[in-house]
Image (tube, coloured by chain):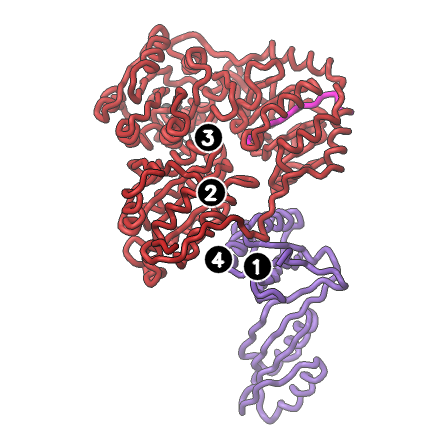
Amino acid sequence: MNLSGAKALLKSLEYEHVDTIFGIPGGVVIPIYDELFNQDAITHYLVRHEQAAAHAADGYARATGKVGVCMATSGPGATNLVTGIATAYMDSVPLVALTGQVTTDLIGNDAFQEANITGITLPITKHSYLIHEASEIPQTIKEAFHIASTGRPGPVLIDIPKDVQTTSARFEYPKKVHLPGYQPTYEGHPGQIKRAAKAINEAHRPVIYVGGGAKISGASEEVRALAETIVAPVTMTLMGMGTLPAEHPLSLGMLGMHGTKYANYAVTESDLIIAIGARFDDRVTGKIASFAPNAKIIHIDIDPAEIGKNVRVDIPIVGDVKRVLQKLIPLLKDTRTKEWMEKVQTWKREYPLEFGETGLKPQYIVREISRLCPDAVVCTEVGQHQMWAAQYFSHRHPRNFISSGGLGTMGYGFPASIGAKIGRPEETVFDLAGDGSFTMNCQELATAVAYDVQVKVAIFNNGYLGMVRQWQELFYDRRYSQTKLSEINFVKLAGAFGAHGIRVDSPSEVAPAIEEALVVPKPVIIDFRIEPEECVFPMVPAGAALNEIIDAKNGRV
Amino acid sequence: MKHTVSVLVQNKPGVLARTAGLFSRRGYNIESLTVGVTENEAVSRMTIVVTGDDTVVEQVTKQLNKLIEVIKVSDLTKESYVNRELVLIKVTADSSNRAEIMQIVNIFRARIVDVAPKSLIIEVTGDEGKLDALIGMLKQFGIKEIVRTGTLALGRGPKVIQSGKD
Ligand SMILES: Cc1ncc(C[n+]2csc(CCOP(=O)(O)OP(=O)(O)O)c2C)c(N)n1
Ligand SMILES: [Mg+2]
């Protein structure tokens, strides 16, 4: 069978079970869009900025576990994807980005709307392709989806010149990929697993430290079984939230810069850290020399390059964390952690997360959203509200907390929430947003309204680039340089796009507003006018050790 | 310290840029890099010589392994290996010193591959020490141009770095 490149592309996507694409057309992708017009296996969502196409595909991927797909034209369309691709790369999200390219005879000539997008994205993709001939399309798509979704997942970019889309070639979808240089290790080394079991069985003060890898691997059950078997506390990174439900008695919530005091104290006093699908990011470890100074470290990760990258590791195990844990757990005994658990529980009682009572507190709003829709998928932007969302929402499910952790991309949450809602239409999807971040991609209200994607946006409106303001308050003598934001009427903004807006000024209005948002059959924005100078606590100042953690009482000088 | 890293890659466009990028990102200047096809023409071998902290070179090696088109990476520095480089040297020469130069060339088992009234081109292969010594000796005559291939290396003994199944 002979097909045009454009047809072959769509056919190949169908073979990969793609039914959703986010994108914007342009000159060199018209042949692909022309084919989209003729079919109904794939739904294309027209977004209003390509960055949002990448973030929506990313949110869709994180919410569903499937590969997200976005598409853009050459040049500016492709470069607009860059932030979204980098965001997905940093958080190991399976994404396939399709870009149009100028015709093969013009490549390298600075042709109209030419950008070397494979070159630009080289360091932020797991892999990329520039297709030269239509016949390469099926094999390339097959490989791209395989690479994006296996091993440590990540974004793959495919650049397709316009003439390749219009020439025809024989189409046969390959059954296999042949990638001699790509063979991820899934099974942990049995000897290493034995050594890990021995270390765990001998530990007195173990702490389980869980990152995003546990979610990706679908290892929530195994993490819980591990914790319950050895009776050890579990702390999670921003990417790991929800792996063990927040209400679980062994959960210590988040660790690191804005982690709980008890998680940070537990890590510091631990004699054995069991790191699962985590990468010892500097926001997590604090000052590296003081990180878990008395602990042995077991590190389970599918990516060998993560082992020993930031901290010395005593027992590395390279493999899929779910499979490794399944092999490890049967070798474990109930360890002698009674005393340790008592100590941890004392810290938990003594140093709970807490906030003041004056005015409209953001922490209170997060608690109310958590109470009224405990099973919602929660997306966030980046800033203070992101940390409050991590700290105060009672996370229950691993794929229900979606946040840009590694890159920290403002403007991520809203388009990601649209992607998440499209991927899981039955569920309530909230974007917990900052007023600064939301305006970075608020044009996507048009997309949400056009496709009736009923996401609910809670704006924590403090009138500031709050997280930066907090640093200026604490470390720069309150010189609020360029962090005050001008007033925006978000209710009118919602109305202009055909969404529903609600303004909330006092605590008594919070629950009714959330309830209203849940029943209004539209995308909704709630403009919560929070205490403008509220800070996120506790906090480990940059470069300090985890136990040098400050809170609202000792934080302000 | 100096590391000689041998990398088997699929012979595809872009693979060189990806590989080199991993070094430059970390501020490492590649001292030399050679590429050529192997016994299997779908596979090329790169030999990269770079000076750097052991742990950083180890991290770069792991990152190299993550590249899809990289089949195998080995840091030859950890074992015993043979390394060779080929250099072409154009020196100023006329009838007055040609004989002296030829004598030096013979001692180093180098060859003269081009003769002109006012210059010679010398071809020499060897390891770094030998090449440096020869270049040092030729300086007195006036070196006009030098071009080097960069280091090639293979581990000693029967052990091979395999490109995997076909
Ligand atoms: C795209 C981007 N630009 C800049 C930053 C730096 N930055 C981090 S948090 C922050 C402030 C965010 O403000 P807002 O969205 O209002 O959230 P708040 O902290 O007030 O809750 C800024 C500017 C960033 N993370 N991302
Ligand atoms: Mg703000």
| Residue at the spot 54% in from the left edge and 55% down from the top edge | B19
- For the residues labelled 1 and 4, the Cα–Cα distance comes to 17 Å
- For the residues labelled 1 and 2, the Cα–Cα distance comes to 28 Å
Residue occupied by mark 4: B14
The answer, for residue A501, to whether it is visible in the render is yes
- 1 or 2: mark nearer the eye: 2
**Residue A110, placed above or below residue A123:** below
SS at mark 1?
Answer: strand
| Residue at the spot 65% in from the left edge and 36% down from the top edge | A311
Q: Are marks 4 and 3 on the same chain?
A: no
Residue occupied by mark 2: A155
Q: Is residue A134 left or right of residue A544?
A: left
Q: Which mark is residue A64?
A: 3
Q: Position of residue A291 (x, y in %)?
A: 64, 29
Residue occupied by mark 1: B30
Q: Nearer the viewer, residue A118 or B40?
A: B40
- For the residues labelled 4 and 3, the Cα–Cα distance comes to 32 Å
Magenta span includes A210: yes
- 1 or 4: mark nearer the eye: 4
- For the residues labelled 1 and 3, the Cα–Cα distance comes to 43 Å
Query: Which chain is displayed in red in the rendered image?
Result: A
Q: Quadrant of ligand 1?
A: top left
The answer, for residue A119, to whether it is visible in the render is no
Q: How many marks?
A: 4
- 1 or 3: mark nearer the eye: 3
Q: Are marks 1 and 2 on the same chain?
A: no
Amino acid type, label 3? Thr
Amino acid type, label 1? Ile
Q: Is the residue marked by circle 1 packed among few (<14), some (14-19), or many (20+) residues within 10 Å?
A: some
Q: Is residue A420 left or right of residue B163?
A: left
Q: Chain of mark 3?
A: A
Task: Please state the extent of the stretch shown in magenta in the rendering.
Answer: A202-212
